[in-house]
Amino acid sequence: MKRLWVFSMFMLMVSSSIFAGGLLTNTNQHILFLRNPARGASTQIDALYSNPAGIAFMENGFHVSFNNQSAFQTRTIRSTFAPFKGFGGSEEKTFKGKASVPVIPSLFAVYKTDKWSFGGHFAISGGGGKATFKDGLGSFESQVAMIPSRLSVVTELPITNYSVESYLEGKQLIYGLQLGTAYQINDYLSAYAGVRVNYVNNGYMGYIRNIQANVGGGNMVNLNSFFTAAGNVALAGLTKDKELDCEQAGWGVTPVLGVDFKAGKWNVGLKYELNTHLNVKNKTKIDGTGLFTDGKKVSHDIPGLLSAGVSYEILPVLRASAGYHHFFDTHAKMAGKQKHIDQGTNEYQAGLEWDITKAVQVSAGLQRTEYGVGDNFQSDMSFSISSYSYGLGAGFNVTPKLKVNVAYFWTDYDSYTKKSNNYNGTGKPGEDILGEDIFTRTNKVFGVGVDYTF
């Protein structure tokens, strides 16, 4: 039973994101991204994140933008493991986790005066939000599923069925505050330098309890009580209830650099975010796992990011854009999981924006995300699978100074199959215990924002 917690709870150290972007980075920080993900050459207020040097080409004045997004995701793991038959009669089980973040705020502000632009923005810059698995996970239950066969050998009593109560709730949020300055070098070129301060707030709560089995082929009994009464301390200890209640916190600084080149109908933006080195510190209330020692620090780096974007004005009312992101995942320390990353994440974007009238614009775009992770990175607690994302929306110029943006963004994920000859470490040396997990998910994001110029 101890191995169950060593495996499952360790995987909580890195949670996959419910937002767009890399393993630990959220790129959808403004509603304009939801309308069209190809924002790497923007010179509007969202450029403060997507193309920070582009704010140098905004109009003089004070610009602010407030946005809210609501994200909803379902994570589904279809697990096949023969011992699961002991609890429900089928070797295949489906475990679902729901993650919802109804309020994801972001605030942007830029002050432009001649060649200088000063800006700052606050957003949920990374993390996976909050997910709840009401029935636990296959990595929890697979260890318990081995009880009938293992205990039948130890006790020499027939045991065929088991049951367990398990639950897991995890959250991972990274709050980012970015400040920086852009300078317009000439009519064609600008440069930007800034920093983002990141604060990590993680929380994990879960349990495995009331482990039962039909010892001797009779009625189901609580194994901890059974072995305690029998005086078998070792087996009583392995089958006792286990709980976890832990918070993690830490912070780190991300240097951000950018350049923008503007010529006629073309605009090109480049941004580079350096790797963010940070650790998170455990604040543990209950730790039945032995893994979350109170006060212990764990590596939690945010990978560096190179972003490139280009836009072109096809007509005065029609614009096209394209972009590319590369996350330097292999250079970031992620509680030891970086050794299972073959290459960094790559993203490709394209989109269009059309001015229907002077007051109404519509836009749409898509993004392809390709992760470079291997089987040993993937688990039911933390999996990253490649996807296609689509966004569409509209902007309404309510007044010459006030604009409202609305958008809808959804993602179609690939499925990822992981087969194992030693499913979740349940096998003994030289023993094959076959199992399979198929990972997939759904994701939907709704957004509305207000831009205002003083």
Image: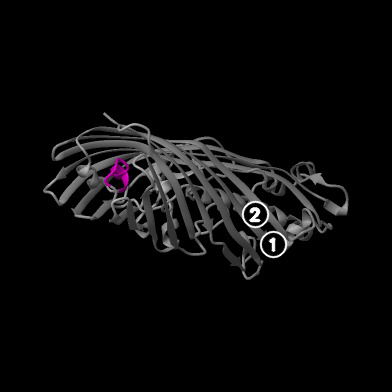
Asked if residue 439 lies in the magenta stretch, the reply is no
Q: Nearer the viewer, residue 451 or 7?
A: 451
Q: Residue at left 62%, top 55%?
A: 77
Q: SS at mark 1?
A: loop
For badge 1, the amino acid type reads Phe
| 229 shown above or below 454 | below
Q: Quadrant of residue 66?
A: top left
- For this view, does 128 lie left or right of residue 350? right
Q: Amino acid at mark 2?
A: Gly
Side of 242 where 374 appears, left or right = left
Q: Dot 2 corresponds to which residue?
A: 138
Kindly check if marks 1 and 2 are in contact, taking CB atoms under 8 A apart as contact. Answer: yes
Q: Does 48 lie within the magenta span?
A: yes
Q: Quadrant of the C terminus?
A: top left
- Marks 1 and 2 sit apart, C-alpha to C-alpha, by 9 Å
Give the secondary structure at mark 2. Answer: helix
Extreme-left residue of the structure = 186
Indicate which disc, 1 or 2, sits on the residue closer to the N terminus.
1
Residue shown at 62% from the left, 65% from the top: 422
Counting the numbered discs, the total is 2
Give residue 183's quadrant in the image.
Answer: top left
Q: Nearer the viewer, residue 305 or 404?
A: 404
Along the viewing direction, whichever of 233 and 252 lies nearer the viewer: 252
Mark 1, residue position: 81
> Where's residue 81, x and y in %?
69, 62
Taking the spot 63% from the left edge, 64% from the top edge, the residue there is 436
The part of the chain drawn in magenta is 43-50
In the rendered image, residue 73, in percent from the top left (x then y), is placed at 56, 47
